[in-house]
Image (tube, rainbow, N blue to C red):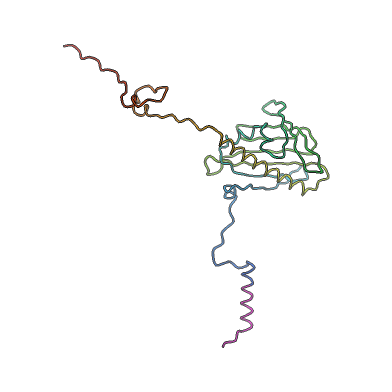
Amino acid sequence: MMRSSPKLLAALLLVSGLFSLGLLPASETPKPPPSDQEKLLRGEVLVTYKMVEDSKISMVQGQIMYEATPEQVWAVLVDYPAYPRMFPDMNSITVMDGSGGAVRIRVKTQNYWPYPDLNYILRMQPSAASLSIDWKMEEGNLKTLYGACKLFPFPGQKGRTLAVYSLVQDPGWLVPRFSSEMGNRSLVIERLLGLRQEVRNRKKTAPAPEIRPQWRKALFWWERQPESDPTLEELFNPPFAAPPPPAKP
């Protein structure tokens, strides 16, 4: 029997260890990580952080895809009285007044113990032309609060919407930065998902568009379209005008 060489045995053990650690490729081709667009199409919420100048905490930005047109999502986004139903953290919304297209709303939200509940007034500035809305706190028991949401047609997906939601919320209390940013991250995700559920609910309850048959128009285009749907008798025995009598010789 051939005796194994110690060097050969050591090499085999090294290679097997590298495979087990994942440092060498497997026999099958590894799949590349899914792109952001694929993640959005699967229903995921993508979250990123951006530093801002006027705050010690980062801006949290979330992206999500909705199975609805931007116009359908916009109608839900500017329905301020429906916010408490959509967003779990909001207890009540009071629409106060507005001028120049802006709307002022009072928001009362439930906070986690031992922190006080939040009570503040936001100035909402919607733009139907750009399908975007931004807001900023005018008064309240927070140090800083502002944000924005903008809707885009989803690239290459007809009838779908890409929503980008940005939030900067700094309580200003003795709250660690990490805790504030994680709380803001949860808020952004909850609100994007809440908006998605409201859009879905409204699409389910929306009346189907009325489709009137065009048989008469297609068959007898020279006649006037009747107000009501034609009967079978009218379809197969149309009331043609009688031909004029022949001229006398």
Image: 240 above or below 136: above
Residue for point 75% across, 41% down: 169
Number of labels in the image equals: 0
Residue for point 77% across, 35% down: 119
Pick the residue in front: 134 or 54: 134
Residue farthest toward the right in the current orientation of the protein: 174
Pick the residue in front: 101 or 4: 4
Segment colored magenta? 1-16
Judged left or right of residue 43, residue 97 is right
Give the image location of residue 16, x and y in percent: 62, 73
Image: 120 above or below 187: above
- Quadrant in the rendering for residue 17: bottom right
- Quadrant in the rendering for residue 102: top right
Residue farthest toward the left in the current orientation of the protein: 249
Pick the residue in front: 95 or 176: 95
Residue for point 63% across, 82% down: 7
| Residue 7 part of the magenta segment | yes
Residue farthest toward the top in the current orientation of the protein: 248
Judged left or right of residue 185, residue 173 is right
Judged left or right of residue 85, residue 54 is right
Give the image location of residue 21, x and y in percent: 64, 68
| Residue 156 part of the magenta segment | no
Give the image location of residue 72, x and y in percent: 57, 35
Give the image location of residue 84, x and y in percent: 69, 35
Residue for point 67% across, 36% down: 85
Quarter of the figure that contains the C terminus: top left
Could you tell me what secondary structure mostly forms the magenta stretch?
Answer: helix
